[in-house]
Image: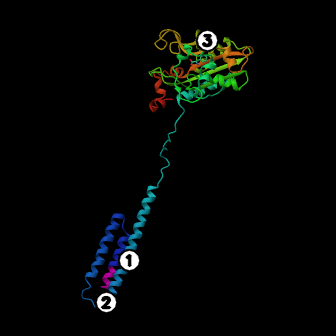
Amino acid sequence: MNKKLESIKEKALQEINSSKDENSLNENYRKNFKELSSVFSQMGDLSSEEKKAIGVKANEIKQLVTRAFEEKKETFVKEKKDNSSFFDITIPGKKTKIGHLHPITQAINEAENIFRGMGFSLVEGPELEDEWHNFDALNFPADHPAREMQDTFFVKSKNKKLLMRTHTSPVQIRYMKTHKPPYRIIVPGRVFRNEATDASHEVNFYQIEGLMIDKEISVANFKAVIEEFCRAFFGQDVKIRLRPSFFPFTEPSFEVDMSCSECKGKGCSLCSQTGWLEILGAGMVHPNVLENSGVDSKKWQGFAFGFGWDRWIMLKYKINDVRLFYNGDLRFLNQF
Ligand code: PHE
C-alpha cells in the first residue's frame, strides 16, 4: 500500500509539473486525485493501525499534489497575463476626437484679424437688451414703423422693458457711453428676431457691427475700410457699391453690395443675374445717436455698419441653408 501511494505521488507530481497547458493540467490533476481517492476504498483488509497510518499518508500526498496543481496553474495564469499585456508599439494610435470651433466663430476670428489690422478692436455686449438701448437710443421714435422692421422677442420683466436684441447696434451706445472717442470697434454677436424659419431666415443669427468715429471720418473712409475687408476675406479683387437706404440711426444710410463672388459680376443664379450681392447695411452715425451716448456731435463723426454674418459665410462657402449652422449636424460641421 505504502509503495502504491509513493508511486501515485511520483506519477501525479511528474504529470502535473510537465502539463503543457491548463486543460491538460486539469485533466492530470483530476485523474491522479481519483486514483489517490481509490486507495481509501482498498483499505478494507488492513488493521486499524495500518489504516490510520495509510490515511495520514494519503492525505499528506493529496495536499502535496493539490499544492503542486495550484502552483502550476498559477504559472499558466501569469503567462496569460504577460501575453495579454504585450504592447505592440507599431500599431498606429487611436486619435482622440476633439471638437473644433464652429464655422461662424472661425469666420468671426478671421474677420477680427482683418479689422484688427486696420486698428479696430473687438467688443461684446449683452444678448438680453433693454428697449432703450435697442431702439430709443438708436433714434427709433416711439411708435415709428421702423420698430416693426425687426420682429422683436420681448421678455416679460418688472422694471425696464427687456427684449432679445434684434441687432448688434445697441452695443454702439453701450460702448460710446463708457468710452471717450475716437472709436474703432467691431462687435460680433448673436441677434434674435421673430421670423418664420426657412433656408434664409432663422430666429437667431449673427451680425458683426462696426463703428468708427473720429474728427473727420467720411463715407470715403467707410468705403475704403469695407473694400479692404471684403478683399482680405474673399481673397480677390471684389468691387463695392453703395445704394441709398434707410436706418433711423444713420444719416445718410446705405446698403452695400459686393460684386458677385461667384460670377465676378457677369450675372448668375447666386446674384439673381444682377452681378451684385447685398452684404451689409451701413451709414454715417446720426447726430442724435452720438448725443444719446454723450458724444458731442459737433466735434465727432463717423460711420457704422452691420453685417448679416451668417449670410456672409454662406456666400463664402456656398452654403444654401442658414439652418445648417444651428442644427448641430456633425456631417456639416466637420467640413470646417
Ligand atoms: N442694425 C442694422 C440691421 O440690423 C444694420 C446696420 C448697422 C445698419 C449699422 C447701419 C449701421 O439691419
> Magenta stretch?
1-7
Asked if the residues shown at circle 2 and circle 3 are in contact, with their CB atoms under 8 angstroms apart, the answer is no
List x then y, in percent, for residue 160. 60, 27
Q: Which residue is mark 3?
A: 253
Residue 5 image offset from top left, x and y in percent: 32, 81
Kindly tell me whether mark 3's CB lies below 8 Å from ligand 1: yes
Q: How many marks?
A: 3
Residue 3 left/right relative to 91: left
Q: Nearer the viewer, mark 2 or mark 3?
A: 3
Q: Quadrant of residue 295?
A: top right
> Callout 3, which amino acid?
Ser
Q: Which mark is residue 50?
A: 2
Q: Quadrant of residue 177?
A: top right
**Closest to the observer, 289 or 62:** 289
Q: Read off the residue under disc 1.
A: 63
x, y percentage for residue 243? Answer: 58, 9
Q: Is residue 3 magenta?
A: yes
Q: Secondary structure at mark 2?
A: helix
Q: CA distance from mark 2 to mark 1?
A: 20 Å
Q: Earlier in the sequence, mark 2 or mark 1?
A: 2
